[in-house]
Image (tube, rainbow, N blue to C red):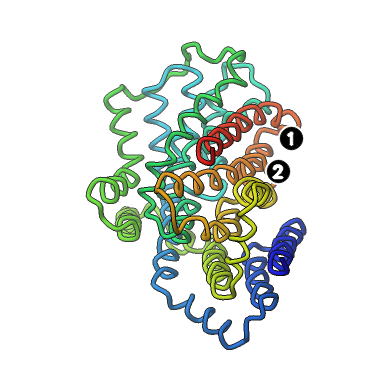
């Protein structure tokens, strides 16, 4: 029982620091130290875990993946690849709703901080002949920007989850894909009455054949990653890193990007977050904290807290996928070492989707804040549209939980 109180204390520390808007990497570092102290871990073993995490092949691979994803997103934006994509979409798509939803959805295939800001001007341009409020535009741009994160294998949140629980990203993706079509259709409900299903009058200078070629070129880096990883079974680290380097070399030779600007603009704190994620997991494991989690999960209330409440709250407070994965997924480890594969994957899926529901509603979610500011929207009006589809997603996790545990 005392161990459980210690665990609750660590969770409270994490939540308090997140509420106070401390940097996530620092919160996880403090949580790691607090875990070691509360579970009476001696200094030398703690330092051994610290150094072991630094030199672990798992840490190195994950840092390479996240860095590559961040760099690729910056290259595609600054190199004009996303602009080519917009031209291709406008020449092919004539339906107003699809002109509004496809750009953020396509750009959503590329993980990048604040990516909704990239698609916001495209959505605004496509809505010129439609009477939509700033809140409606914010909702459409934000929601369809995030319909892929439930399963898309190059999103850092899913990759971090894979590395923590030691289950291949491909396996998680294939198990969780159903929530993406659910998000697509549930996202339609708040906007069915807006009258944006008609044919658009927006004209394009490109014909359809050229438009298709532009879309292909705009998505070529993503297509290469998919082919390497999903089809040819090349390691995810090699697939993403090699594609990023090839894109960098290609754009540099064409003088489309300035390397100094590209590297200066990267969010290097994300790499610190990744390291502290793995450190927290390793300390929790070596200190005996995970054994306390296993005892907590014996009760129905404990299971609900670990799988639903804690991931949701962490996602809501941070607005970052990696955050709720980092904090809550180490707590899942006692539950995934035994049992049928469907049971283990369902547990992971419930926690992942619950946390992401919190991220979607978070007022500090960068994409939501940037979209809101870009269109001049107000939060109450945005939440009016955002809440119904999120509730549908949450209901989906409840159904999944009932089918898993009953």
| Image quadrant assignment for residue 381 | top right
Tell me residue 215's x, y (percent): 34, 34
Image: 41 above or below 273:
below
Q: Secondary structure at mark 1?
A: helix
Examine the rendering and report whether any part of residue 253 can be seen: no
Q: CA distance from mark 2 to mark 1?
A: 8 Å
Q: Looking at the image, is 78 positioned above or below residue 268?
A: above
* Apparent side of residue 35 relative to residue 151 in the rendered image (left or right): right
Identity of the residue drawn at 73% across and 69% down: 2
In the image, 104: left or right of 4?
left
The residue sitting at 44% across, 56% down in the picture is 338
N-terminal of the two: label 2 or label 1?
2
Q: Residue at x 30, y 29 (%)?
A: 212
Q: Quadrant of residue 223?
A: top left
Residue 363, numbered circle: 2
The image quadrant where one finds the C terminus is top right
Label 1 near label 2: C-beta < 8 Å?
yes
Name the outermost residue toward the bottom: 44
Residue 22 locus on image (x, y percent) = 71, 63
| Viewport quadrant of the N terminus | bottom right
252 or 304, which is in the foreground? 304
- Out of 384 and 277, give the one closest to the viewer: 277
> Which quadrant holds residue 159?
bottom left
Residue that carries the numbered disc 1 in the rendered image = 379
Give x and y (percent) for residue 188: 55, 22
Report if residue 368 is visible in the image: yes
Residue 223 appears left or right of 335: left
Characterize the local packing of mark 2: few (<14), some (14-19) or many (20 or more) Cα atoms within 10 angstroms: some
Label 2, secondary structure: give it.
loop
Extreme residue toward the left, this view? 232
Residue nearest the observer in this picture, 37 or 247: 37
- Taking the image as shown, residue 367 lies to the left or right of residue 156, namely right
């Amino acid at each position: 029982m005392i161990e459980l109180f210690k665990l609750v204390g660590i969770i409270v520390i994490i939540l308090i620091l997140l509420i106070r808007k401390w940097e996530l990497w620092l919160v996880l570092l403090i949580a790691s130290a607090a875990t070691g102290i509360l579970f009476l871990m001696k200094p030398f073993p703690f330092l051994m875990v610290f150094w072991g995490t630094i030199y672990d092949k798992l840490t190195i691979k994950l840092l390479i993946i996240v860095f590559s994803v961040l760099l690729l997103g910056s290259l595609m934006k600054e190199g004009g690849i996303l602009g080519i994509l917009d031209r291709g979409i406008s020449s092919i798509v004539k339906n107003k709703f699809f002109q509004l939803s496809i750009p953020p959805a396509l750009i959503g295939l590329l993980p990048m901080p604040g990516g909704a800001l990239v698609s916001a001007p495209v959505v605004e341009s496509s809505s010129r002949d439609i009477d939509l409020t700033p809140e409606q535009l914010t909702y459409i741009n934000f929601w369809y920007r995030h319909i892929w994160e439930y399963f898309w294998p190059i999103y850092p949140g899913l990759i971090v989850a894979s590395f923590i629980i030691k289950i291949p990203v491909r396996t998680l993706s294939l198990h969780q894909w159903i929530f993406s079509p659910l998000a697509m259709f549930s996202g339609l409900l708040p906007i069915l009455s807006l009258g944006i299903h008609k044919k658009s009058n927006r004209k394009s200078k490109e014909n359809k054949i050229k438009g298709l070629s532009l879309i292909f070129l705009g998505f070529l880096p993503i297509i290469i990653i998919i082919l390497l990883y999903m089809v040819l079974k090349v390691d995810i680290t090699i697939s993403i890193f090699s594609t990023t380097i090839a894109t960098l070399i290609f754009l540099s030779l064409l003088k489309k990007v300035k390397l100094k600007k590209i590297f200066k603009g990267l969010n290097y704190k994300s790499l610190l977050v990744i390291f502290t994620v793995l450190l927290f997991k390793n300390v929790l494991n070596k200190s005996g904290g995970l054994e306390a989690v296993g005892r907590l999960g014996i009760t129905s209330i404990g299971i609900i807290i670990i799988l639903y409440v804690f991931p949701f709250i962490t996602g809501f407070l941070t607005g970052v996928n990696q955050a709720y994965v980092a904090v809550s997924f180490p707590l899942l480890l006692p539950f995934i070492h035994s049992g049928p594969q469907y049971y283990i994957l369902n547990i992971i899926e419930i926690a992942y989707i619950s946390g992401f529901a919190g991220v979607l509603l978070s007022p500090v979610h960068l994409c939501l804040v940037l979209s809101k500011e870009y269109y001049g929207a107000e939060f109450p009006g945005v939440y009016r549209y955002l809440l119904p589809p999120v509730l549908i997603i949450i209901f989906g996790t409840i159904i999944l939980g009932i089918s898993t545990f009953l």
